[in-house]
Amino acid sequence: MSFAKLAASAAALAVVSASAASARDQVQVAGSSTVLPYASIVAEAFGENFDFPTPVVESGGSSAGLKRFCEGVGENTIDIANASRAIREKEIAACAEAGVTDIIEVRIGYDGIVFASDINGNSFEFTPVDWYKALAAEHFIDGELVANEFTTWDQVNPAFAAQNIQAFVPGTKHGTREVFEEKVILQGCEDGGFFQAMLDAGVDEDTAEEKCMALRTDGRSVDIDGDYTETLARIDADKDGIGVFGLAFYENNTDKLQVATMNGVVPTTEAISTGEYPVSRPLYFYIKKAHIGVIPGLQEFAEFFVADEIAGPDGPLAAYGLVSDPELSSTQDMVASGQAM
């Protein structure tokens, strides 16, 4: 098989239209907006290089995609769910209740979560503590929780400009939100001593964690339910805005955005691959094993997705911004064997 068309396919990032699926001879995929561009690249290349229809790839967020995935088995349900986080135990249980008992987890590589703002605006060198202090709904001060009254970034950190706090963060249906809450907000709460202060005051651990990750609702932190293009549009309309993005999206919009450091580290694919950049996560897709051999091209598409020529360090996914998985060969073997979780 020739891979000559792959370079051209890397530019073909438009989502494959669901209306094209007139019959159930196409692989159907939905889920993470972070994984969306990678899955779209692979779908286009698959349609060009194989005698199967181009898979239908939709977005909607990790949670929404997994919810659709767990609706059941059959031609009226999707075959693959993309996710920017690992599937949760409660989702596995929901799948099982609906008859989806064999799930194949496929890790495609890694991505970083970055903090970017208008290219002509102020620059920032963040820590998780800064983000916790800026966006937490409440701060634990002198033994009690008080509402967050910070309105400008210099109140958070005197080294910052007196710029209005206006953050655009992924909504709760996105897997990126969970990573943001745990690796940035909760980490900042812990690093700043606020979490321990609550424990010392007699607050139980679960409540303390919940209070740490609760974001303010006064308009300073805005949930974005759409994809990263919506976040970019919000920043274009409000130059004080700072958005939470995947590294690949930022790297493809450097003419509009500047990126902040986190703990003194500039987010790059190299810094993510070495673990130096602190806010990174694996990316996945989940296959409904019962559909393999029933939906034409499903097994072939999964194997194609993780092939060296596609997901390796010199493939089109890496060219778009994916950090290649050093254990890709193991993933390839697992996909070929159909090994379920």
Image (cartoon, helix red, strand yellow):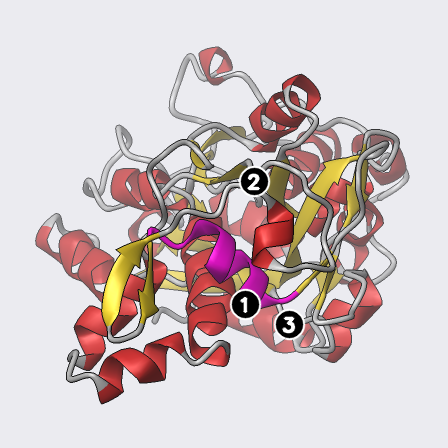
Kind of residue sitting beneath label 2: Ile
Predominant SS along the magenta part: helix
Residue 69 visible (yes or no)? yes
Q: Is residue 94 above or below residue 208?
A: above
To which quarter of the image does residue 122 belong? top right
Residue placed at 57% from the left, 61% from the top? 130
User: Of the residues shown, which amino acid type is indicated by label 3?
Assistant: Pro
Query: How many numbered marks are there?
Result: 3
Label located before the other in sequence (3 or 2): 2
Element type at mark 2: loop
**Residue receiving disc 2:** 165
Asked if the magenta segment contains residue 207, the reply would be no
What is the three-letter code of the residue carrying label 1? Val
At x 22%, y 61%, the residue is 92
Residue 163 percent coordinates (x, y): 67, 39
Mark 3–mark 1 Cα distance, whole angstroms, equals 13 Å
Pick whichever, 32 or 219, lies toward us: 219
